[in-house]
Image (spheres, grey):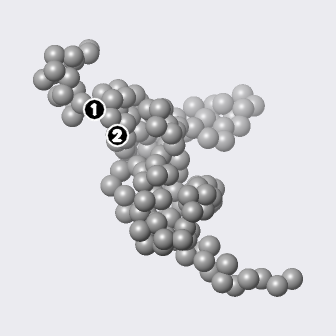
Amino acid sequence: MVINKSAEKRNTMQKELTLEAVQSFDGHPCVEDVYDIVSKRYKAISKATVYRNLASLCDEGMISRVSGCDGRGVRYDSDTHPHGHAVCMECGDIIDIPDASLMEQIKKKASCMKEAGFSVRFHELIFEGICSRCREKEKKNGTERI
């Protein structure tokens, strides 16, 4: 079997560019954000390749997925340490919640579930609400919700 070294190298470079794009993004990028960054450096990349590379990077534990509870689809996070997220239901901003004690409690709950015969493969902690910037806009417009 002949291995195409240039195709192998191209894929590695594209994957590396994809990882760098997620890591350089200030926040939690969606596929479009990552594609915009990567395509500026590597014009020939397709969006399908970016999707595949993001999936591969998630599978390898290099980045993580953040569910699209704000209706905007999946976002990506270069911080793979256990933490939660707060998602603004107005603008879609995602804020990291690095609460070690909370994550430890979740880990204990997962352990209890294992004792009950349930094997937890994935969990995600997401709080939905309105960020301070959007709440300020609501106050100015007189549309603030409690």
User: Which residue matches tag 2?
Assistant: 93
The answer to whether the residue labelled 2 contacts the one labelled 1, judged by CB atoms less than 8 Å apart, is yes
Query: Which quadrant is the C terminus positioned in?
Result: top left
* Amino acid at circle 2: Asp
Q: Nearer the viewer, residue 99 or 16?
A: 16
* Amino acid at circle 1: Cys
Left or right of 41 on screen, residue 58 = right
Dot 2 alpha-carbon crowd within 10 angstroms: few under 14, some 14 to 19, many 20 or more = some
Q: Position of residue 109 (x, y in %)?
A: 57, 31
Residue drawn at x 26%, y 15% as measured from the top left: 145
Left or right of 142 on screen, residue 75 = right
Is residue 62 positioned above or below 107 on the image? below
Spatial distance from mark 2 to mark 1, Cα to Cα?
8 Å
Is residue 146 positioned above or below 5 on the image? above
Which corner quadrant of the image does residue 99 belong to? top left
User: Which residue matches tag 1?
Assistant: 131
